[in-house]
Image: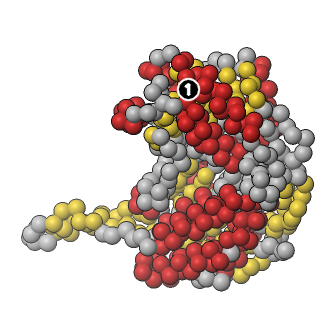
Amino acid sequence: MSHRLLIDGRLVAGAQSLDVIDPTRAAVFAQAPRADAAQAERAIAAAKRALAHWTALSYDGRRPYLERMADAMAANRDRIAETLTRERGGPIADCRVEVERATAAIRHFAAQKLEDRVLRQTDQELIVEQRYPQGVVVAIMPWNRPITLLAFKFGPALITGNTLIIKPAPSTPLSTLLLGELAAEIFPAGVVQTLVDANDLGPLLTSHPDVAHVSFTGSTPTGKKVLGAAASTLKRFTLELGGNDAAIVLDDADPEWAADRIFASAMINAGQVCYAAKRVYAPRRLFDAVAGALAQHAAAAVLGDGMDPKTTMGPLQNRMQYDKVLELIASARDEGGNVLTGGEPTGHGFFIRPAIVTGLPDRARLVREEQFGPVLPVQLYDDLDDAIARANDSDYGLGGTIWTGDVRRGIAIARRMETGTIWVNQHMSLPFDVPFGGAKQSGIGLQNGIEGMEDMTQLRVLNARLAA
């Protein structure tokens, strides 16, 4: 199947092509069109031209376009999900859920609007908070959840009246290009566009004077580069970056129950999720039971082709991440870690057997860094205050979890965590009407909720004197 870019309302070939790797087999399975700088410039110019008409439609006028997009995604769910399975790996059931959640997000935001808010009204004055679209938004996407994470930008950017240029990760471009092909039949020219690159067009897009907002999801080091590029024009930005989420097991928790849920929260998408649990803190009394149960879950994981219904865990998405995770596992062994199970490659594709590691010092790389893969350190604690301090001792502050038999106690502990989101007795609950974002080096700005929509708009305060 031939894939094409969407530029100025037309599906076009790229200036060059790009190999797309199937991580299950570590082999090329498709070609993607690759845009050059001239095509990027055309996309920016088209997005700028489309702004006036798109903004003038108002919320009620824009809503039907987003609803038609959601309908088209629902009708093409299986085709998009199968493409996701091939390009990012992972079980087909998980990929279907990703498409379904993205579809639901776009449908949710289609029905939202930002109303004027009266701040003060007297006989003498009227002060009103108003919001208007910022302009051309560039969405730069990661490879781990390319469709769901895009929907969190797509819906808020478009319903508030901005136009949108989407740049997927070079290793997972095809599912996004499929969305572009659907959008070509729905949106006016220039309102939605897709550009694929080899990580070479980012500087042009993030520094371009006609781009008003850059919404980036990805690693913290790359996010810092985006922030630097945006500074020259003081453009607005949203950065959803890395995490090193701690899971704290309290001494009143059922260790088997907690381990079951922590394993699911740590190994979702083979650990390649920013909000995945990245390190566990367990009390001495429950430590062996928690670590042992986690190891049992890891040993039982079924690695394989995502199209096989028996598969429960897919591969790492790309060679670079595969090598990085193997290096972290090797460093954990060098730093005194005890690998209870897993940690070795399977010998085909980018698969690594899920690993549970104990006995590491808090300074170990696997504890300090974001592994973004199927390896989980379990740390022992004797004092809960100490565990909280150790969990907070991180450059990251995206999310985290508390696992307890007493939810009120868990809520009290959660108030002490330095993160953008903290869950108690659950994980990865991200309702569309609730904002999320990171503390510390896990990001700037918010997505989802009314707050995520506000991030895509400019605040204007109308201040009128009504009487002399």
Residue 314 at x, y = what percent?
Answer: 76, 49
Query: 184 or 293, which is in the foreground?
Result: 293
Label 1: how many Cα within 10 Å (few below 14, some 14–19, many 20+)? many
Residue for point 58% across, 33% down: 256
Residue for point 67% across, 22% down: 358
Residue 233 at x, y = what percent?
Answer: 54, 56
- Residue 441 appears anywhere in the view: no
Residue 136 occupies quadrant: bottom right
Left or right of 322 on screen, residue 406: left
Query: 422 or 178, which is in the foreground?
Result: 422
Left or right of 334 on screen, residue 192: left
Q: Secondary structure at mark 1?
A: strand
- Residue 237 appears anywhere in the view: yes
Q: The disc labelled 1 sits on which kind of residue?
A: Tyr
Residue 53 at x, y = what percent?
Answer: 50, 82
Q: On the image, numbered disc 1 is attached to which residue?
A: 281
Residue 298 occupies quadrant: top right
Query: 260 or 168, which is in the foreground?
Result: 260
Residue for point 83% across, 33% down: 344
